[in-house]
Image: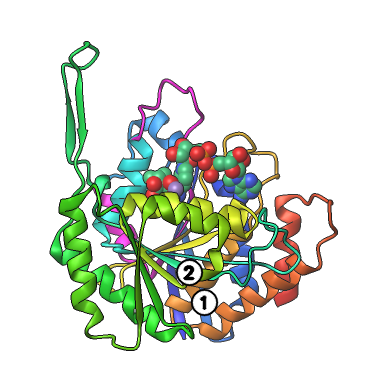
Amino acid sequence: SGTVPLAVVPGDGIGPEVTTEALKVLQAVTPAGVRFEPTHYDLGADRYLATGEVLPDTVLAEIREHDAILLGAVGGKPGDTRLPAGILERGLLLRLRFELDHYVNLRPTRLFPGVTSPLADPGEVDFVVVREGTEGPYTGNGGALRVGTPAEVATEVSVNTAYGVERVVRDAFARAQRRPRKKLTLVHKTNVLVHAGAVWSRIVGEVAGEFPDVGVDYLHVDATMIFLATDPARFDVIVTDNLFGDIVTDLAAAISGGIGLAASGNVNPDRTAPSMFEPVHGSAPDIAGEQKADPTAAILSVGLMLDHLGLPEQAQAVERAVLDDLAARTPGATRRTAEVGDAIAGRLA
Ligand code: NAD
Ligand code: IPM
Ligand code: MN
């Protein structure tokens, strides 16, 4: 109970639209005795274009003092030559994940009643991807030589430390142990990426000894695509590196019925810094500003946040309200972003 300082980074494109609805739902579900105190940070494309700032150290230090972060999405309009590639993605989003040590990127996938999966017969889909969030090819360890010449060479080196792999693998095992099916699948490409693959395989094997009741499985990432499309119900907990996890979770979102439904948590399990909750999707410049975005993913991310903050009943209430809202939808009808948020908040009021 008490006051919960919350940093809110609406960001770009549809980010502000879906964040508004997420906060609406948070207000509606907040129990007596608790007060969320949101502080908005105007980080993103507009600030960068106006000031050249992406994430000033002073702002990062302020954000660090909150109990959690709610983020919409970052990323400018395609073809905007004033925005260098990756400047916001790396300088804002990844910097937050790295600096705040969000080593568990949690991305659950399920089917929703009333939502049609593109798969004709998906089965009982309910799995969670534990995506490593601070290493892999995302660290910026690479470079380019002789740029623009026929002799150009570019590298992006994947960083995999025993420390970084072990902590995320142990978290994934612990999650698998708490789930009914108790199954963990390591997804990698150990047949080609032999150095990183050896670290992941060895550590999964070692940590498995501490969780004798968890069944362990391995799939190459390419074969994982086969099974996600043909038998997604086989998965329970997937643990994988930063880049594979990024790709796997967009397909997972599509299987469940759309990217507008996929929630995520960038979790710092040691609680040395605030965790950050955001939809899996991006800034969707193609539909931005039109109230066409589905805010459900952002709202479900609030559910993950409530769980992390020790409010599991409220987390479940958000999930229930979302499920009821989806089940009650009129097939074929389109709703504005705010209408979806109002409907879900209305079920909680
Ligand atoms: P995207 O997720 O923004 O959009 C992909 C497609 O999904 C688009 O057609 C879009 O309209 C649709 N879509 C996304 N969210 C939706 C929603 N809530 N409701 C309905 N439709 C939705 O991915 P992209 O087009 O590859 O990337 C656009 C920008 O977003 C890029 O700058 C990228 O770097 C950035 N991005 C940011 C994040 C993030 O902030 N976490 C994630 C992914 C991409
Ligand atoms: C995501 C996004 C980010 C990622 C980008 C925008 C840095 O695609 O959250 O899935 O690759 O992690
Ligand atoms: Mn992604």
Task: Give the residue type at disc 1.
Answer: Arg
Residue 211: name its quadrant: bottom left
Please check the rendered image and state whether residue 220 is part of the magenta-colored stretch, yes or no.
no
- Residue 251, percent from left and from top: 52, 52
In terms of sequence position, does the residue under pointer 2 or pointer 1 come before the other?
Answer: 1
Image quadrant for the C terminus? bottom right
Residue 195 visible (yes or no): yes
Residue 40 or residue 213, whichever sits in front: 213
The verdict on label 2 being within 8 Å of ligand 3 is: no
Residue in view at x 21 percent, y 56 percent: 197
The one nearer the camera, 190 or 314, is: 190
* Residue 136, above or below 170: above
Q: Where does the magenta region start and end?
A: 57-86
Element assignment for label 1: strand
Q: Give how far across and how far down residue 28 sits, in percent.
A: 65, 73
**Nearer to me, 64 or 258:** 258
Is 62 covered by the magenta stretch? yes
In which image quadrant can residue 20 be found?
A: bottom right
Residue position marked by numbered label 1 in the rendering: 35
Residue visible at 25% across and 54% down in the picture:
190
Q: How dense is the environment of label 2, judged by Cα within 10 Å: few (below 14), some, or many (20 and up)? A: many
Q: Name the residue rendered at 67%, 77% in the picture.
A: 320
Residue denoted by label 2: 235
> From mark 2 to mark 1, how far is it between C-alphas?
38 Å
Query: Please, what is the three-letter code of the amino acid marked with disc 2?
Result: Phe
In the rendered view, how is the structure colored? rainbow
* Percent coordinates x, y for residue 208 in the rendering: 25, 79
* Mark 2 secondary-structure assignment: loop
Sort mark 1 into few (<14), some (14-19) or many (20+) by Cα contacts within 10 Å: some
Residue at screen point 51% across, 45% down: 282
Question: In the displayed structure, does residue 69 sit left or right of residue 279?
Answer: left
